[in-house]
Image: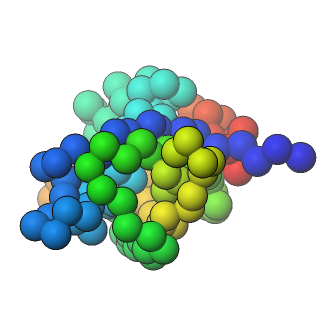
Amino acid sequence: MEEKYYEYRHTVGFEETNMVGNVYYVNYLRWQGRCREMFLKDHAPSVLEDLQHDLKLFTLKVDCEFFAEITAFDQLSIRMRLTELAQTQLQFSFDYVRLGKDGETLVARGNQRIACMRGPNARTTPARVPEALAKALQPYS
């Protein structure tokens, strides 16, 4: 059975590298966020609208384990999967795959835990994962 994932493609730029020429670690976390945002845009636009009202998606935990270095102009596929769906929280895994003429290389793997909250900033409370989001994520678990 083929694994299903949401894919965000990215070309590494010079601004994402450090003085040595490899990608600065914080960018991997930025790409997780970008992948998640693009998923919402592509598959759950109603959730984006809800975020402009009182829904909030708080990142509770994020991690990334590195296996190989990447540099400017490397082509990446960031592949997001749903690993857990609870009443008020979600957990995603992210595979960072370098795409090259010799094939694919897994260069990093990360995880992210998200809590759904509602209410004004000073008084947010846990909220159920929106049905539209849970439904959009079904193929990616």
How far across and how far down the image is residue 62, in percent?
38, 69
Which of these two is toward me, 139 or 125?
Answer: 139
In the figure, is residue 83 to the left or right of 97? right
Residue 2: quadrant of the picture: top right
Report the residue that reaches farthest toward the front. 102
Q: Residue at x 26, y 31 (%)?
A: 52
How far across and how far down the image is residue 15, in percent?
13, 49
Q: Is residue 8 above or below residue 59?
A: above
Q: Is residue 15 above or below residue 87?
A: above
Which of these two is toward me, 109 or 136?
Answer: 109
In the figure, is residue 100 to the left or right of 140? left
Residue 117 in view (yes/no): no
Which of these two is toward me, 62 or 114?
Answer: 62
Report the residue that reaches farthest toward the right. 1
How far across and how far down the image is residue 63, in percent?
41, 73
Q: Is residue 57 above or below residue 83?
A: above
How far across and how far down the image is residue 135, in percent?
65, 35
Q: Is residue 4 above or below residue 32?
A: above
Q: Residue at x 52, y 53 (%)?
A: 97
Which of these two is toward me, 121 or 71?
Answer: 71
